Image (cartoon, rainbow, N blue to C red):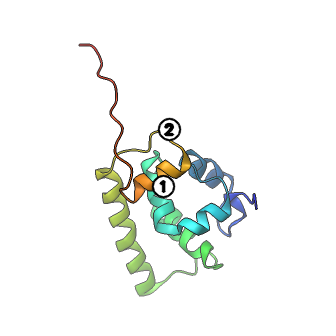
Amino acid sequence: MNDPVSSIRNLGSASDQGYGRAGIVTATQLRNLGADAAYLMYLKSGGFAHFIGYYSLVMGLQGRPWNDCHGSEKTNLRIRFDALKTKAKSAPSIDKGRSELEAALDVIGVVEKRRSAKKAP
């Protein structure tokens, strides 16, 4: 099925663009990856880290409105969000020349980091 990422509750056209840069172009792909893996790919591809965007994704994948997140659930999601930000900063960025599969494998640490050509001084 070719349903856009924005067909998931709480996500709009900016999500299509942001997740598309990470190689996630359908809602089915995003659902199969899950919120954390997809958000990490989004961050590694240059996406802006924003807590509301993250928990909106989590809530949307559960079929819930974005503002249905409260109390300890929200606190736990903040811990996961902060861990994803830290992991994204320490991980290599997704190479735009890589396929979607390579990018996903890179997220879980299976694909070896590509070496870039050295620039002349």
- Give the residue at mark 2: 96
Quadrant in the picture for the C terminus = top left
Question: Residue 28: image x %, image y %?
Answer: 66, 64
* Residue nearest the observer in this picture, 3 or 12: 3
* Residue nearest the observer in this picture, 69 or 86: 86
For the point 66% across and 78% down, the residue is 63
For the point 34% across and 43% down, the residue is 113
The mark tally for this picture is 2
Q: CA distance from mark 2 to mark 1?
A: 12 Å
Q: Is residue 2 left or right of residue 91?
A: right
Q: Is residue 56 left or right of residue 113?
A: right
Based on the displayed image, in which of its 4 quarters is residue 31 positioned? bottom right
- Give the residue at mark 1: 104
Q: What is the residue that sits farthest to the left in this orientation?
A: 121
Question: Residue 66: image x %, image y %?
Answer: 59, 73
For the point 48% across and 55% down, the residue is 104
